[in-house]
Every structure is written in C-alpha cells, then in structure tokens.
Image: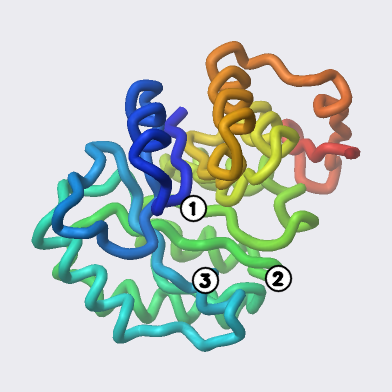
Amino acid sequence: MKIFVGGGSSKRTRRVLRENGIGEMLVNPLSKTQECPSLWAFDNGAFVNWKEGKPFDSAKFQRWLEYAYRNYPRPYLAVLPDKVGEGMKSFEFSLKWKETLTLYDWPWYLALQDGMESAAVIGEIDKVSGLFLGGTDDFKKQAGYWKKIAHHSNRPFHYARAGTLGKLAHAIMIGADSLDSAFPLWTKDRLFAFIQALSQQQFPQELLIFEKLPQYGAGAFTQIK
C-alpha cells in the first residue's frame, strides 16, 4: 500500500516521512528551492476551494499542473478536477476535464463523491486510471464496495482523507491500494503513532469493530464506530 500525507509539512517531518517510505499529496507545486519527493501525488485543489466557499479555481489548477508536469517526476496518481459533494455533477465535470488533459499523460483518478451512481462509474471506468474515494464520512462507509468496482476493472483504489487511525484501519482492512491522511501532521506524537500503526498494522481494539454491508455484496464493510 502506498501512503501519502498532505504537503506543506516541516523539513523534519518531510525527512521522517521519506525515511519511512511515505509520500506527499501536493495541492500546489513546491518552492523551486525544495526538492520534489520521489513518491508524490497531485491533488487538484477542489477540496481547498470548497472549504473556503469558493468555486473550483481552474486557472490556478492549470498553472500548478503545467509547472509540475514540466519540473516534477511522474506522480503516483493525479486527481481529476471534481465538485465536492455534488455526485453526478462532479462525475460529468471530471470526465469533461479528462478530455482536456490528454496532453498530460499522468495516471488520472476519478474522485468519487456522495450520490455518484456506480453504474455510471462502471460505464466510464476505462477512461480513468483509478478511483479516488472522496465524499463524507458516511459515504466512506462504502469504501469496500468501490474498491471492488475498481479491482474488477483492474484499476487501483485510493482512500482519500483517512484522517483518523480508525479510517486508516478501515482503508487497510478493505484492501485499498493507497491512502492519504493529514493525521500525522499536527503533532510529533501523532506522526509517530501513525508510522507505528502502519508498520505494525496494529490498532486499538475499539477501532476494529466492523459490520458487513450486505447490499454491496461480499467484502464490503464499514466501521460501526
């Protein structure tokens, strides 16, 4: 499993991450004075725009993309522009962007959002390189289901914003191919708790209570807590 944390961390944190094989999820290019990590992923900035109450900044996205494409190594994944929480509108928006990004031969992932129809995703999955699980906490309960869809189509599955140790355990349990998290960025204790959980694959028992989701078939689980 490939692990990523948000960009913008301190030099010390970046060093610890690299020593432990953890990459960075970058939402904008690094300063030209800094070295791009060899393991990195390109975020589109839509979530940041949404949190600020702003529409997707396509001009800034294209500037970031052009700079990163010219100056950085190929990312592990790149997230197509999306509309946070807008389901099928986001789906259509992402596919339109995919048509305009043909010159950028990166592994473009479709961001999954609440309300997105699985039949529509399955019908167009050959156009993308993988599935990227966005959405609310409730939507993330379907992670195992969307992972099955991705793997059935020979596509990798990324679990986005695994911001707690419980979500980290969930992502590992359902077999995600990669995940990102901001959990280790807040304090030194959280950084080392995160690394220890990853290396030992051990979590507090109260984080490991799961229930099946029969409506999504065998192998689909969610956490009760």
- Nearer-N-terminus badge (3/2): 3
Q: Nearer the viewer, residue 164 or 147?
A: 164
10 Å crowding of disc 3: few (<14), some (14-19), many (20+):
some
Q: Are marks 3 and 1 in contact (CB under 8 Å)?
A: no
Residue sitting at x 72%, y 61%: 136
Residue sitting at x 46%, y 50%: 6
10 Å crowding of disc 2: few (<14), some (14-19), many (20+):
some
Q: Nearer the viewer, residue 87 or 18?
A: 18
| Label 3 to label 1: alpha-carbon separation | 20 Å
- Nearer-N-terminus badge (3/1): 3
Q: Are marks 2 and 1 in contact (CB under 8 Å)?
A: no
Residue sitting at x 49%, y 80%: 92
Residue picked out by circle 1: 131
Name the amino acid type tagged 1: Leu
Residue sitting at x 35%, y 49%: 41
| Label 2 to label 1: alpha-carbon separation | 15 Å
Task: For residue 99, say whether it is visible.
Answer: yes
- Nearer-N-terminus badge (2/1): 2
| Label 3 to label 2: alpha-carbon separation | 20 Å
Residue 177, image x, y percentages: 48, 34
State the SS at label 2.
Answer: loop
Residue picked out by circle 2: 115
State the SS at label 1.
Answer: strand
Residue 26, image x, y percentages: 36, 55
Residue 162, image x, y percentages: 62, 44
Residue picked out by circle 3: 48
Name the amino acid type tagged 2: Gly
